[in-house]
Image (cartoon, helix red, strand yellow):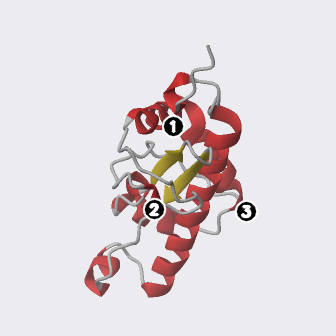
Amino acid sequence: MSLDVEVPDPPRLSGPGDPGDYESVEEAEEWTGDDAPRRALSEMLSAGAWEDGFEEWRRGTSLSVAQFEATCELGAFQRLDFHYNPTAEDVGYRAPSLPEGPDTLAEAGLDRDDAREIEGELDDLGRIVSEVLENDYIHRSSEEFGYDWE
């Protein structure tokens, strides 16, 4: 079943930036705090990686349109975050949690079961987008990612 919705805007990558805070990324030996790779990831998300990953995720998600709309309303897609680890040459992601308060969920038309399902789907989306970035968008010989072969 495919979810028939518009692709939301890509996330703005405003998370902590520390590689240890992301799923599917090896712990870096040393974190330099360099923002150049994050800026490059952000540009790649805007250039099509987000849309490509979202399209793949949308074809297999179990979310209903109502759950998707509530997720948008809660700003969860915008809070997904990605990080490039040059040491391991991988892209990690951090999927957001939904607000815990039952009132917040109820206002969005959700219950705790919906919240758990949405959080699982956000995790799947993060994994898919990170794979799209790794496989289709990152040119590992590029300077943005710490390589200068000349």
Q: Can residue 7 be seen in this view?
A: no
For the C terminus, the image quarter is top right
Residue placed under numbered mark 1 in the picture: 45
- In terms of depth relative to the viewer, which is nearer, 59 or 77? 77
Q: In this view, does 15 lie to the left or right of 145?
A: left
Residue 60's mark? none
Residue plotted at (33% across, 55% down): 16
Are circles 2 and 3 on residues that touch, CB within 8 Å?
Answer: no
Q: Quarter-wise, where is residue 60 in the image?
A: bottom right
Distance between the alpha carbons at the discs numbered 3 and 1: 25 Å
- In terms of depth relative to the viewer, which is nearer, 59 or 14? 14
Residue 1's mark? 3
Tell me how many marks there are. Answer: 3
Closer mark to the observer between disc 2 and disc 1: 2
Residue placed under numbered mark 2 in the picture: 20
Which mark is first along the chain, 1 or 2?
2
Q: Where is residue 85 in the image (x, y as percent from the top left)?
A: 53, 47
